[in-house]
Image (cartoon, rainbow, N blue to C red):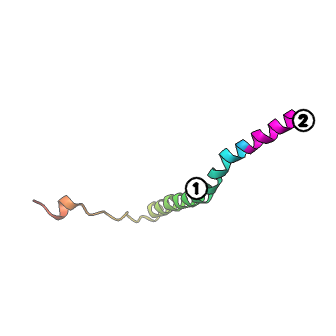
């Protein structure tokens, strides 16, 4: 009987330690999907020959 109680307490403690991280799973899924979409977009731009948009630099726009 003592081993059964010890097993239940150990399982409950493990559950309390692991359970809060389960809430982050949807966020990690969104990050994974957005990362895949970003890479796929860049890959398709390269295949189609479109140059990426050039970001303007402040030093070039306003020479001193």
Q: Quadrant of residue 36?
A: bottom right
- Mark 2 lies on a secondary structure that is loop
Q: Give residue 1's mark.
A: 2
Residue visible at 49% across and 63% down in the picture: 41
- Mark 1 lies on a secondary structure that is helix
| Mark 1 neighbour density, 10 Å: few (under 14) some (14–19) many (20 or more) | few
Of residues 25 and 64, the one drawn nearer to the viewer in this rendering: 25
Which quadrant does the C terminus fall into? bottom left
Gap in Å between the C-alphas at discs 2 and 1? 41 Å
| Mark 2 neighbour density, 10 Å: few (under 14) some (14–19) many (20 or more) | few
**Secondary structure predominantly adopted by residues drawn in magenta:** helix
x, y percentage for residue 19?
67, 50
Residue visible at 15% across and 64% down in the picture: 62
Of residues 56 and 49, the one drawn nearer to the viewer in this rendering: 56
Q: Earlier in the sequence, mark 2 or mark 1?
A: 2
Span of residues in magenta: 1-12
Q: Give residue 28's mark.
A: 1
């Amino acid at each position: 009987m003592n081993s059964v109680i010890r097993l239940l307490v150990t399982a409950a403690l493990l559950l309390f330690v692991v359970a809060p991280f389960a809430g982050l799973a949807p966020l990690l899924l969104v990050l994974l999907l957005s990362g895949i979409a970003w890479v796929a977009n860049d890959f398709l731009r390269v295949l189609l020959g479109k140059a990426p948009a050039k970001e303007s630099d402040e030093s070039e726009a306003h020479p001193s």
